[in-house]
Image (cartoon, grey):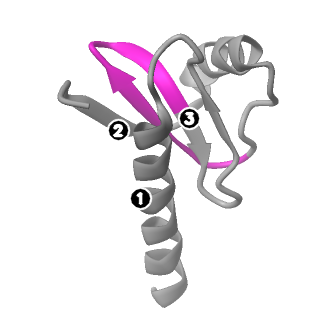
Amino acid sequence: MTEPITITNYTEADAPKVWRLAALDDRRAPRGPALLAYVHGELRAAVGVNDGHAVADPFHPTADIVDMLRLRARSELTEAVAA
């Protein structure tokens, strides 16, 4: 993927977008803290920080994005445990 990706932390304001994405992916939305990935302002994937559960846009290539979010989530968990 060569397009810029913006990663943000999930907030309650993101809930409708994440629920829509989960419905599109026919999966449940991540629970608890999550990381979101946007490409050109469109939400493409969301990954739960605690369990790595992912939802992604099935109409775009997202495997690399989900992998990147999971790696970032593991890093955040490791930092939280070390603190």
Q: Earlier in the sequence, mark 1 or mark 2?
A: 2
Residue receiving disc 1: 72
Residue receiving disc 2: 7
Secondary element at tag 2: strand
Q: Say few, some or many: other residues with alpha carbon within 10 Å of mark 1 (under 14 / 14 to 19 / 20 or more).
A: some
How far apart, in angstroms, are the residues tagged by discs 3 and 1? 12 Å
Residue receiving disc 3: 46
Q: Quadrant of the C terminus?
A: bottom left
Towards the viewer: 18 or 67: 67
Residue 10: within the magenta? no
Whether residue 9 is visible to the viewer of this picture, yes or no, is: no
State the image quarter where residue 54 is shown.
top right
Q: Earlier in the sequence, mark 3 or mark 2?
A: 2
- Give the amino acid type for the residue marked by disc 3 in the picture: Ala
Whether residue 59 is visible to the viewer of this picture, yes or no, is: yes
Where does the magenta region start and end?
A: 32-45
Residue at image position (64%, 17%) is 21
- Give the amino acid type for the residue marked by disc 1 in the picture: Arg
Secondary element at tag 1: helix
How far apart, in angstroms, are the residues tagged by discs 3 and 2? 9 Å
**x, y percent for residue 37:** 41, 32
Residue at image position (64%, 54%) is 52
Q: Main secondary structure of the magenta part?
A: strand
Q: Earlier in the sequence, mark 3 or mark 1?
A: 3
Image mark count:
3
Residue at image position (70%, 47%) is 53
**x, y percent for residue 62:** 47, 30
